[in-house]
Image (cartoon, helix red, strand yellow):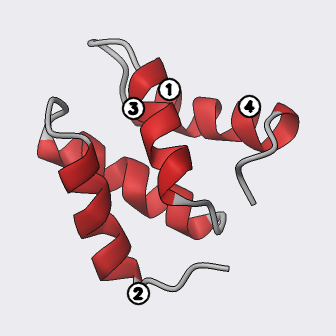
Amino acid sequence: MCVYSKERFVEVAVKLCPKLPRDIAELIGEEVFRVEGTVRDVISISRLLKKHDGPEDIRDLLQTLMKYGKEVG
């Protein structure tokens, strides 16, 4: 269970992903929050992204983590 509001969770995600463009970090935060993930999930996804990945790639990574990983949800 997430103890952050959505806005605060997204702010934390942006701070955890300083090398990513802000809009991508915000999207990661929003998507992870939506599935009740943790800040560790934000870090995991940010490390797995490639430079050219976009919103669909982020959603695909999150679905994969939800299906096979133990951290999400």
What is the three-letter code of the residue carrying label 1?
Asp
Residue under label 4, please give it.
64
Give the label, 1 or 3, closer to the camera. 3
Q: What percent of the width, then of the height, locates residue 54?
A: 36, 28
Q: What percent of the width, then of the height, locates residue 68?
A: 85, 32
Residue under label 2, please give it.
5
Residue found 40% across the figure and 48% down from its top = 28
> Which numbered marker is on residue 46?
3
Residue found 14% across the figure and 46% down from its top = 22
Which SS class for mark 1?
helix
Query: How far apart are labels 1 and 4 at the CA level?
Result: 10 Å
Q: Is residue 39 left or right of residue 69?
A: left
* Image quarter hosting the N terminus: bottom right
What is the three-letter code of the residue carrying label 4?
Thr
Do the numbered discs 1 and 4 sit on residues whose CB atoms are within 8 Å?
no
Q: Is residue 7 above or below residue 17?
A: below
Query: How far apart are labels 2 and 1 at the CA level?
Result: 25 Å
Which SS class for mark 2?
loop
Q: What percent of the width, then of the height, locates residue 21?
A: 14, 36
Residue under label 1, please give it.
57
